[in-house]
Image (cartoon, rainbow, N blue to C red):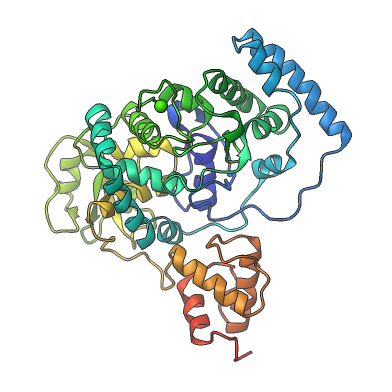
């Protein structure tokens, strides 16, 4: 999911880092956490517990609300036929209300978040996609000024290169959220935008699915973001970010350009701090001239000096002074605008570097229990299944059931029972695959 809420989702589910929530296209949101069952990582999945069905009274209230919204949509220029057909007969979806209020009981450390998002599989897939879409990406860069690696990195994190775009019917989710819950005004605006998208013939209504909060397509744009930033790149008259890869790639580049992307500039670098550096200088909004960091003894990890320029830059310490440090420039902020979480932006720019042949971060994360790649998460789940834990499929998604099984095994092994899928537990289970020592 992209903009706004989905941003929030990430920020919330994930981070020890930045949590401000500003969705693309400048939608200002002061939202709290709501993990999105979206594409990418959504590390802390909402509880899989069954949601109670809607009562007849709840459905009737939704129907009455939608009747009012139909009138309103028509008054605001949505074609009558579109409003009447698509804002009628929608079944209330209580699960999206639950997602809206979901508070993750588990905060994913940034090293887990990055281990799942920027893993070998995504680097390999991304390089293959750059190869496959080379001509389109060159044309996108020529027109919108954003390089192939960055565009493909966003694509890979947003929707796993178009493979995971969300399965919830957008109209049903947005209708429910427009009539109940704590952010109805915001969602009504999105619902109106989604009707305009249908009226424009951009997206097949039958394939108009996405995250619980309404982010959809390969770019995971919210509907309002779509209206502002989506482009028709293949020239068929439809801005189709669902089924047309060139439209999706160009829309991402267009979004970043509008968010202030500067062609040809780096996002920033991993850096090394001098002894005794004042960590209170860190913070994405505490901008200083690049030359200022250089004068304070901050150097790139490759040993090269930071340029002595006046470019506005900030220092990030996503895991505190003991972990990797970064100096970031304007393009980092452009990526941050896509999904307002520093960890998200770091995942994108790092994946882009890796797609260009760059190496993993030099400074290790401050943990003795590193995070797992998606392949390792599936391996961990396979080991849990082999021990009789009923966690369903080994899909690499660490949800409530997997966490419960992890706690059981952590208790058995004598690790802290935090439900976290980390390398210590995986290593312990590998040594004892059948649980023979039980
Ligand atoms: Ca098109």
| Nearer to the camera, 113 or 320 | 113
Whether residue 122 is visible here, answered yes or no, is yes
Q: Quadrant of residue 180?
A: top right
Which residue is at a point 41% across and 73% down the rendered structure image?
Answer: 368
In the current view of this chain or complex, which residue is farthest to the front?
Answer: 236
Residue 273 versus residue 377 in the image, above or below: above
User: Taking the image as four quarters, which one is ligand 1 found in?
Assistant: top left
Which residue is at a point 35% across and 27% down the rendered structure image?
Answer: 233
Which residue is at a point 59% across and 9% down the rendered structure image?
Answer: 77
Whether residue 230 is visible here, answered yes or no, is no
In this picture, residue 96 sits left or right of residue 147: right
In this picture, residue 138 sits left or right of residue 5: left
In this picture, residue 382 sits left or right of residue 117: right
Which residue is at a point 62% across and 28% down the rendered structure image?
Answer: 187
Residue 113 versus residue 218 in the image, above or below: below
Q: Quadrant of the C terminus?
A: bottom right
């Amino acid at each position: 999911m992209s903009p706004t809420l989905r941003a929030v989702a990430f920020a919330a589910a994930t981070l020890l880092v930045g949590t401000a929530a500003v969705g693309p296209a400048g939608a200002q949101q002061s939202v709290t956490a709501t993990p999105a069952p979206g594409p990418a990582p959504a590390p802390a999945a909402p509880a899989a517990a069954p949601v109670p069905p809607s009562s007849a009274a709840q459905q009737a209230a939704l129907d009455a609300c939608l009747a009012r919204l139909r009138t309103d949509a028509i008054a605001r220029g949505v074609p009558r036929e579109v409003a009447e057909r698509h804002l009628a007969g929608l079944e209330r979806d209580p699960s999206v209300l639950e997602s809206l209020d979901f508070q993750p009981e588990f905060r994913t450390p940034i090293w887990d978040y990055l281990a799942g998002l920027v893993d070998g599989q995504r680097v390999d897939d991304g390089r293959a996609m750059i190869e496959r879409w080379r001509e389109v990406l060159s044309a996108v860069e020529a027109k919108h000024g954003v390089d192939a690696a960055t565009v493909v990195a966003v694509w890979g994190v947003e929707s796993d290169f178009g493979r995971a775009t969300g399965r919830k019917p957008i109209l049903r989710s947005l209708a429910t959220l427009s009539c109940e819950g704590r952010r109805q005004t915001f969602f009504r605006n999105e619902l109106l935008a989604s009707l305009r998208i249908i009226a424009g013939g951009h997206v097949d209504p039958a394939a108009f699915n996405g995250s619980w909060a309404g982010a959809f397509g390969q770019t995971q744009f919210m509907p309002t973001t779509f209206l502002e930033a989506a482009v028709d790149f293949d020239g068929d008259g439809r801005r189709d970010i669902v089924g047309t890869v060139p439209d999706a790639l160009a829309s991402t580049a267009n979004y970043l350009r509008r968010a202030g992307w500067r062609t040809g500039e780096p996002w920033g670098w991993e850096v090394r701090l001098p002894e005794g550096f004042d960590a209170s200088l860190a913070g994405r909004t505490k901008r200083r001239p690049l030359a200022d960091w250089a004068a304070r003894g901050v150097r790139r990890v490759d040993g090269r000096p930071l340029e002595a320029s006046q470019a506005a830059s900030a220092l990030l310490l996503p895991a505190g002074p003991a972990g990797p440090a970064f100096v970031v420039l304007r393009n980092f902020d452009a990526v941050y605008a896509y999904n307002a979480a520093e960890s998200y932006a770091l995942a994108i720019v790092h994946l882009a570097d890796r797609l260009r042949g760059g190496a993993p971060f030099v400074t290790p994360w401050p943990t003795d229990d590193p995070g797992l790649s998606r392949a390792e998460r599936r391996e961990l789940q396979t080991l849990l299944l082999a021990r009789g834990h009923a966690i369903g499929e080994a899909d690499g998604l660490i949800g409530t059931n997997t966490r419960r099984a992890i706690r059981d095994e952590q208790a058995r092994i004598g690790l802290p029972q935090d439900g976290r899928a980390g390398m210590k537990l995986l290593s312990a289970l590998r040594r004892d695959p059948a649980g023979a020592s039980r």
